[in-house]
Each structure stands twice: as C-alpha cells, then as structure tokens.
Amino acid sequence: MTTLLDALNAAVNHHMAGRTGPAADAYRGILALEPAQPNALHLLGVLRAQADDAAAAVPLIGRALRAQPAAPAAWGHLGAALRAAERPERAEPVLRRALALDPANADALDAMGATLHALAIYPAARRWLERAARLRPSHAQTLLNLGTVLRDQRRFAEAEVCFDAALTRKPDLADAHLARAVGRLVRGDLRAGWEGFEHRWQRFATPPWDGRPTGGATILLHMDQGYGDAMQFVRYAPLVAQVAAKGGGRVIVETHPLLLRLFAHSLEPAVQVLVRGPEPPPHDIHCPLMSLPRAFATDLMSIPATMPYLAPAPGDVARRRDGLVASGWTEKAGLRVGLVWAGNPRHRNDRNRSIPIAALRPLLSVPGVRFIGLQTGDARADLARLPGDGVEDAVERVRDFADTAAILTTIDLLVTVDTAIVHLAGAMGVPSWLLLPHVPDWRWLLDRADSPWYPSLRLFRQPRPGDWTTTLGTVAAVLKAHAVKLARC
C-alpha cells in the first residue's frame, strides 16, 4: 500500500528528473488527500515558479508556510517568487526571515540580491550576491545576477567577467547574453551589443534577414518588443525598402493596431503596413524591428537620424486644431508643455522610471507655462489629486498613436519619463525633455544630455538612485528660463 511519504518521494523524483507534468500531478494528488501537506504545497509552488508562473507559486508556498512556519527553504522560495512576480517590496522582508533562519541559504541570498537590485539599492544588492557567489562560485544564475548589479554600478569590466563565467557554465543562458549586450550598448559599443541582443527573440520558420541583397524576396519586418521600440526602429523600414527594391523585392511591416494608422501614413507606399495577426503574412525572409540596427551594422556614427520619419495625417491634425480653436484653448497665453509622468505599471522597471505625481509640484509651479496632460493608463487618474487647474487633460477621445501624434503638433515642448511617447515625439522632431532614472535604459547611453537617436531630445538624469527631487528641480529651473525667454520674444 502506497503511503503519503512514498507518494511524496515519487513526486520529488519526477521533479528532480525534470518530468514536470507527472510531478505536478503527483503533488496535486497528495493535496487532494491532505490539502495542507506543507511539502507538497511548497514543492508544487517551486514547480510553478520554475515554469515562470510566479503569481501561482506565491499562494502555494504561502499556504505551506502557514502549516510549517519555521521552514527556511520555503521562506526563501516565497521571497524569490515574490521578486519574480515584480513585488520586491514584499519580497525583501520575506527573504530576511529566510536568512535569519538559515544564513547560508544560497537561493535566498541570491534572491535578496536580485530583490534589492530591483529596488535600485545597488551596494547592498552586490553584497548579498557576493555572499551567494562565495557559497556557490559556479552557479550561473548567481553570476548573472551579480554581473547585472555590477553593470548597473558601472563596474563594467567586473560585470563582463561575471557574464563570461556564467556563459562558460551555461552557454545557452539567454539572459546572460542579453545582460552582457546591454552593458555594451549603454557604453556605446553598439556593434558588439547588437550581437548579444539577438538572444531576446525566437526565430520564425523563415530565414532571418541579415542586411544582404534580397533578390525578389518579400521581407517581413515585425514587432518583437513594445510600442516605443517599434517607433524607434521602424526608421529602418525605408532603408530596407531601398535594398529590396534593387532586386524587385518588397517589404511588409507588421505592427500593433495602435500603431497601424501612424505607420501606414508615414511609411506607405514604400512599404506595406499590416496589423499583426495570429499568423505572419506570406513572406520569404524576416527581421524583427529591433534587429535592424544589427543588419545595417549601426554604430554611434551611423544611426539614421533624419527627422521626422513619423507624422500624423493632415486630417487628424486639422481635426485636433479645429477642436482646440472651438474650445478657446489656442487663445490662452503661455508655453505649451505636454507632460507624462508614468509608464506602463507592468513594465519591470516601472518603479524606477515613473514619478509620483506629488513630486511634480515644483515643476508645475513654474510661471508662464501651460501644462497639457498626455498621460494615459491608470496614472491619468492622478490628475484629480493636483490642486486647481494645474494640468489640462488632452487625451480624451485618443484612439491610437496617430491621434497622440496630432496632439504633439499643438505643443511647444514635451516633458516625459521614459515611455513610448518620447519615441513618438523624437521621431516627429518635437522638442522633448526626457527624465531618466540613475540607471537608464541602454538606448540613452551614459553621461550625456543629448541622444544620437533623436536630435530634438534633451536628457535630464537622476544624480543618484531615486532622486527625482534634484532632477525635477533642475528641469523646473531650465523650464523657467525657457518660459521667460519665450515671453520676451
């Protein structure tokens, strides 16, 4: 007769052998008989976390800890799952409890370092990860996490050593290739960075295009990341069309519905623009939009930066301006400044790049400025928390990025955090100020106030992690001088 212990041992054997389906079935079988069995709950949670389903892992491991609250491994795995679920604020105290119970728990040490990294507490993150690395010096994930923190501390040579060591132990670790690529890209070593950056996507069945002549082939260019990435790199589509035309080929750009009208107006007839569907349209070769810089061997001196390359349709602009005239909006004096303070909350780095609206008060107090809210999503509701009529909401009835582009033609300046609208404004040549966290996305490079990707863009950087006060104080002072200069003209 099979006992519960026998069933648990069988489930663990399946789990350790990588037979995830039978392992999950076995754990669930145990829990059907004993719903609070802590080991089955814990290990089923670990299994879900290993399948990249951290949201399902958290309640399972939490139930295990209610039944067995002094289990250090379960506390460590719960903390790691919370971090993977993008909840680092909750993960940190959980991991501290795990390490209080077992200071040598390498998994918990690693997760603590990764958690503090997500919270932009870089020196402490590095210390925890160095402790984990001393316990398991050949562990690829720990080396990757340590290298990522070192990279974000600008200790690039040490970071490369960690990434190389991780890849020696696990050559197919895509995240290590990507982390190393980001370190090269942010330093401006673009050609080396593009190579590692190829590990971010899965190839189609058709051959990838590498920049060579295409004959009469149909080339499919497709989105593989977000809206902003698509707008940044669609600048290459006309260049691809020039290559294709020499051999009688053609180019298709497949994109999201929210970008369709904008791209179609800006790119057709040189390329055909289609909405992305469940299956790609017929084509011979393909290339993700973010792989086009590699195909063209782009470096800092050869970035295509002829502006504008995106524009709204004249009809959209006319309707927007007619509406503003009818409302009396155009008769009001002052520098017209569009404002965006938050990105997509589901972005893994959103806590570092978005700004609490209360922190904007020094900026909003600058005289001679009319602020126009271009914020979308949940953060748009924050406008109600501002006193008086500080910011006019301009995104009512906005359907897509073509409508947003039409709004951008009515302002003098955009001030924004690092989200999609900065790419739209940059691609249109609209003067824009970008507020960047201390560790910026790779495309904004380091220690410069301009961008080779967008000539109309000015960068304002945090001097230290989390310090929006200094950054916004600087922006407010520069904006005040800008408004005074305009008033004198």
Image: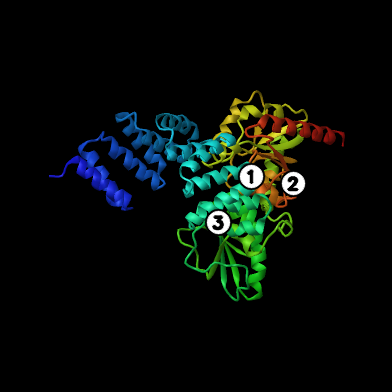
Amino acid at pointer 2: Asp
The nearer-to-camera label among 2 and 3 is 2
The nearer-to-camera label among 1 and 2 is 1
* Residue 155, disc: 1
Vertical comparison of 55 with 265: above or below? above
Helix, strand or loop at disc 2?
loop
The quadrant of the rendering that contains the C terminus is: top right
| Residue at figure coordinates x 75%, y 41% from the top left | 412
Helix, strand or loop at disc 1?
loop
In this view, the residue in front, 134 or 334, is: 134
* Residue 223, disc: 3
* Residue 450, disc: 2
Vertical comparison of 480 with 249: above or below? above
Within 10 angstroms of label 1, few (less than 14), some, or many (20 or more) residues? some
**C-alpha gap between disc 3 and disc 1:** 32 Å
* Residue 82, disc: none
